[in-house]
Amino acid sequence: MNKQQTESFVYKMWEDSIIPELCDYIKIPNKSPMFDPDWEQHGHMDDAVEQLETWCKTQPVQGMTTDVIRLPGRTPILFLDIPGDSDDVVLLYGHYDKQPEFSGWEEDLDPWTPVIRDGKLYGRGGADDGYAVFGSLTAIRALQEQGIPHARCVVLIEGCEESGSFDLPYYIDHLGDRLGTPSLVVCLDAECGNYEQLWCTTSLRGNLTGTLRVDVLTEGVHSGSAGGIVPSCFRILRQLLGRIEDDADGKLLVDELFVEIPEQRFSQAELAAEILGDSVYMKFPWANTAAVNSTGSVYEQLLNNNWRPALTVTGSDGMPALGNAGNTMLPTTSLKLSFRLPPTADANEAASAVKRILEEDPPAFSEVSFEVASTMAGWNAPPIADWLEQSMHKASELFFSKPSVYMGTGGTIPFMGMLGEKFPEAQFLVTGLLGPNSNAHGPNEFLHIEKGKKLTCCVAQVLEDHHLR
């Protein structure tokens, strides 16, 4: 593969085609079904997948078939099948559903309005994960434009990833033999430590979500007449959370949520910590930067983020907004709990343990329930084949002039766990554009355009090397 020809083709595709398409894609509020239960009636999901389908059909990819597959009541998938020069199969994956708007966007930015500023494309879903299908097909075209052979490629873009991919297993069963047996999986939906080199994800955490509810009364009562007799729902919730989390340092107290960390992941975290330094924690939008102090070494922070469990309270119910908060004892209060689980933890075992600990021996005067909403397995990459390790390093040196780096990440991509079980012999290139301050899921999400171009070139290089291995 000729470096200059590849860069020239890929950069032109991004400027002339991909960026305009991503701008149109950002305008579509196709929130994942967990956040838009009426997605079928609203039609935004169909608008998004049809936009991607239309663009794919305009691409002169040799022999490609393009299908939007719809199962009743399930978010549709985009499925592309591109013949190759060997019997090998490469599966390229991404998703087109989006997180909700969230609050706190800068005054001149909006989740559904694309804005290009300082080499970044702002708007919901551009980096997470609208670019995946564009980058995948452009990498394949970069090879075909130079007459370079590649394996058969199948591209699968789902519409349920941000809700835990609960629709995806039905499509995997429906596709059957059409997927083949991939020897390489390329996932463009992951993080990167910086925008200066190729980052290769070695592990993803699992996820457990559920609702913790405390009932004390059947209706609200006067806080003056009841205070001191009726306990506060919120105090009981704090007491229950103390069973599973140390409120001093956030360390979780449930043994079933921990695993033994593989030895190789320690050395990879050491190298990543050396490269990233304090950017590991300084990349976040702290409310008071003067008060920010690193808690422990950067190395330990990476292990905490990649291989240790963590709890976040992501929502509440039963607590009125401040403007409506009268002097009333609340009858019931609920919290949405989100646990990030180590890559090799058993998510169902973790859910059972958390439910048992929270519900047993409820505090006096209260009823307690923890209803599990979803359990998603994590993923730990298999040993990296020599050819893939050499290819990723070669690609990063070619297009970034820096070596590739391995790093676990704290997020969850359910499909990687599914694929790891279904195709245990497959190799994985899991990478992406979600770098410092890109803020997927939050306000001011952006896609780093230059990194997107270079990453596309790197994927083309790996596809060539996969065929030559």
Image: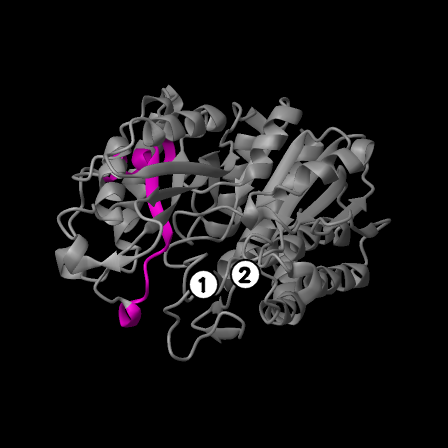
Q: Amino acid at mark 2?
A: Gly
Q: Would residue 5 be visible to someone looking at this image?
A: yes
Q: Between residue 288 and residue 236, name the one nearer to us.
A: 236
Q: Amino acid at mark 1?
A: Glu
Q: Would residue 405 be visible to someone looking at this image?
A: no
Spot the residue most to the right.
63
The residue where tag 2 is placed is 125
Using residue 209 as the reference point, say whether residue 246 is left or right of it.
left
Using residue 42 as the reference point, say whether residue 103 is left or right of it.
left
Residue 445: mark: 1
Residue 97: mark: none
Give the magenta part as a residue range: 298-324
Instruction: Locate residue 395, reporting x and y percent.
Output: 54, 43
Q: Between residue 268 and residue 438, name the one nearer to us.
A: 438
Task: Name the residue at 62% across, 68% down.
Answer: 28
Where 259 falls versus 439 (above or below)?
Answer: above
Instruction: Locate residue 399, reporting x and y percent.
Output: 52, 51
- Structural distance between the alpha carbons of marks 2 and 1: 8 Å
